[in-house]
Amino acid sequence: MTGLTDPVGVSIVHPWDPWRQGVGGFDTFLDGFLRYAPPDWEIELVGTTAEPHVRRVGRWHELDYAGRKVRFFPTLADPNPNLVPRIPLSLQFSLAARLRRPQPSSRVVVYHRFESAYAVPITSPGRSAVFYLHNHPAEVDSPYSDVRWARLSALFRRLLVQHLNSASLVVCVDPRTPAWIAEALPGWRGQVMWQKQWADPRVFHLEGGGAVSDARAALRRRLGMGSDTRLLVFAGRFEKQKALFQLIDIFARARQQLDRLGLVLVGEGRLRRRMEEAATERGVEQAVRFLPPVSRADLASIYHGCDVAVCTSAFEAGPRYVFEAMACGLPVVSFDVGQVADLIGTDCRVGYLPTDRTASEFIKGLACVLSSPQTPERAARCAQRVAAHTPQAVLGPILAAYARLAAPDGAAPFAGGESRQPEQD
């Protein structure tokens, strides 16, 4: 039996390899949790491995991650976490885990996809299940949905509700999801929390007090673009949800009205080739640059060299890259999705929120934002909008909830102290 003063234990079940991460908010959240959870917490992960010759499948490993010890059990090999496999990874993960039967040792078991509960179900008493909903469940059958559940939305909802009904805690990222849970689970006695997005200040921050000239010149040399090119940037998965064909169309139209524009697309996904074809069809291929997934530090340097971050997504829970771009001093033009509206407001010095989902309104926003020079003062104004959105601030209430669930009576006060400061990589 765990005592009140004993370290909190958390078992995470998710098809993920911390040492070879992919693109997306799941990976960034889990990375932040490992870095910022209290140093005396005992964390284990049932996941996947991108390097089975280093982290062998089917056995527990005691490993170091960002200065902390992590128990890690990879159930199968996933050599490229940025590619969507023909057989859904969640299904492969569940089958492999049921075959190898890793047993979590912690009182708190965390699932970042509800399907992972089939991989490692809770079979012994005294454990609490925590489920994360990183996307709004109602969007599963959206015309822009890229998940395979889209054709089985009724079954998806039934299975999801069944699992959530057994949870002690559900953490939602999309602001709309708590209301959805209240409607879908009347009488449920668990706790719901809303998780704001964050930008990790270790990585995403102003460069040189907001000076941008050196970063701008370096990025344009890297991309082979003119020194006077004004760069728009998107970072994330190249999938249907992101409405990237609309972004390419908007960019092509914007170039007819605004001078010297370039578009930088950082990421990977199933739509990469079709996006290249779309840029060629619109005659803007010479002004578009595709970059593969990069490290977070490299992504920050890209933001420092750009002029505006753009988001045309059909729906989002965050998106996180908007927070990270603003933390680097970059203004944002984005449709009203996820948590964007509270950041941007109506000040063109920090961004623009179009009033409708049309190209003309989005281009109006670009013109407004690009009409002001990118100065250190402006960069600081953008960064200030997300200054309070740090991993420590966002994770604090979640860590407290975990600690209560981990206590013998399931309701102890937060026993972990303040979240840790991670070691630099």
Image: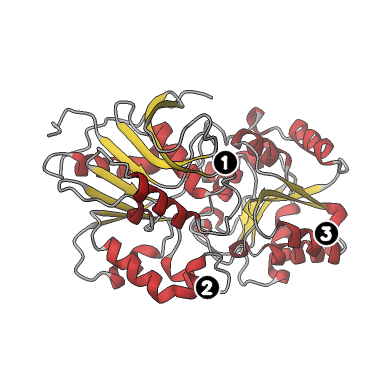
Q: Amino acid at mark 1?
A: Ala
Q: Residue at x 23, y 71 (%)?
A: 186
Q: Residue at x 81, y 35 (%)?
A: 217
If you read the primary sequence from the N terminus, does the residue marked by circle 3 or circle 1 appear first? Answer: 3
Specify the quadrant that holds the C terminus. Answer: top right
If you read the primary sequence from the N terminus, does the residue marked by circle 1 or circle 2 appear first? Answer: 2
Specify the quadrant that holds the N terminus. Answer: top left
Q: Residue at x 43, y 23 (%)?
A: 67
Left or right for 310, reference 178: right
50 relative to 310, above or below: above
Q: Residue at x 23, y 39 (%)?
A: 403
Callout 1: few (<14), some (14-19), or many (20+) C-alpha neighbours within 10 Å? many
Of the pair 104 and 370, the residue shown nearer to us: 104
- Evaluate if marks 1 and 2 touch, with contact meaning CB atoms under 8 Å apart: no
Of the pair 349 and 177, the residue shown nearer to us: 177
From the image, tell me which residue sits under label 3: 258
Secondary structure beneath dot 2 equals: loop
Q: Nearer the viewer, mark 2 or mark 3?
A: 2
Q: Amino acid at mark 3?
A: Leu
Query: In the picture, residue 135 is in which quadrant?
Result: bottom left
Q: Nearer the viewer, mark 1 or mark 2?
A: 2
Give the Cα separation between the discs numbered 1 and 2. Answer: 31 Å
Q: Position of residue 325 (x, y in %)?
A: 61, 45
142 relative to 371, above or below: below
From the image, tell me which residue sits under label 1: 327
